[in-house]
Amino acid sequence: MKPVALVTGGAHGIGAAVARRFAAHQLDVVIADIEQDAGSELGAELGAIFVRADVASESDNRAAVDAALTAFGRLDIVHLNAGIGGPGPISDGDFDRERYRRTLAVAIDGTVFGIRAALPALAASGGGAIVVTASLAGIAPAPFDPVYAAAKHAAIGLVRSMTPTVAESEVTLNAVCPGFVDTPMIAEARAKLLEYGVTLADPDEVAAAVQSIAAGGETGQAWKVQAGQAPALVSFPVLDTG
């Protein structure tokens, strides 16, 4: 029986690259995304299952997991990848409150609800792996979009804090932290980034890191992924809690 992977935010960008990589390596794939047309098209291309899902909805996360179990009878890898850019500087007079709330809902609710939905299914399969897409903005300041940075810091904190709990189910939990990646999310800023000499990673570089992290057996870690570089562990300070 093939391993089964669920990828949220799988219709475009990093998520689509991960879905393609898993399918190419003979995994059965479930793609979950709010983008119906793009997700359905990719699903047809890969022979994967597509489920329209808003990760900010707990019931939609459960439905995506249920789709995997109904179609394939098991779940082995979950890539909680869905994310959106934030509203930009929060001191501006035209601060977009709806975008602010949506950014946090997708990044934080999507991770919490995704883990809650996936954990019983992974445990029933004898264990597995959850990889959460965070960002370099989750380990370093990002003044151009502080809400996005806050959401990604929170996602990393959630991963590190939940690791002992999910370990009881033989599940590994890690975060992947890409730098700038050549995806639709940065389309408006792409020309300016290149003008400033920023090297953009290809989405498949991140996909390769996700595959490696899921298979590697490490847990509770955050991994930096930058263009042309191998994934590297993020070092966090060890605090004396005694």
Image: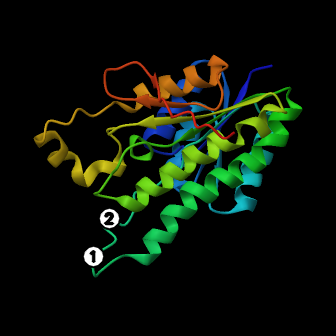
Left or right, 141 with respect to 14, comes to left
Left or right, 144 with respect to 224, comes to left
**Element marked by disc 1:** loop
Question: Which quarter of the rendering shows the N terminus?
Answer: top right
- Disc 1 vs disc 2: Cβ atoms closer than 8 Å? yes
* Residue under the point 14% across and 36% down: 197
> Could you say where residue 73 lies in the image, as x and y percent from the top left?
85, 33
**Which quarter of the picture shows residue 126?**
top right
Residue type, mark 1 in image? Asp
Q: In this view, does 38 lie above or below 105?
A: above
> Could you say where residue 12 lies in the image, as x and y percent from the top left?
45, 44
Q: Is residue 55 visible?
A: no
> Could you say where residue 198 lies in the image, as x and y percent from the top left?
20, 36
Q: Residues within 10 Å of mark 2 (few under 14, many from 20)?
A: some
Q: Is residue 78 above or below residue 102?
A: above
* Residue under the point 53% across and 34% down: 45
> Could you say where residue 146 lies in the image, as x and y percent from the top left?
37, 59
Residue that mark 2 sits on: 88
* Residue under the point 33% across and 52% down: 142
Question: Which quarter of the rendering shows the C terminus?
Answer: top right
19 or 170, nearer to the observer: 170
Residue that mark 1 sits on: 92
* Residue under the point 64% across and 19% down: 215
- Give how far apart the Cα atoms at labels 1 and 2 are: 9 Å
**Element marked by disc 2:** loop
Q: Can residue 212 be seen in this view?
A: yes
233 or 2, nearer to the observer: 233
Residue type, mark 2 in image? Gly
Marker count (numbered)? 2
**Which quarter of the picture shows residue 76?**
top right
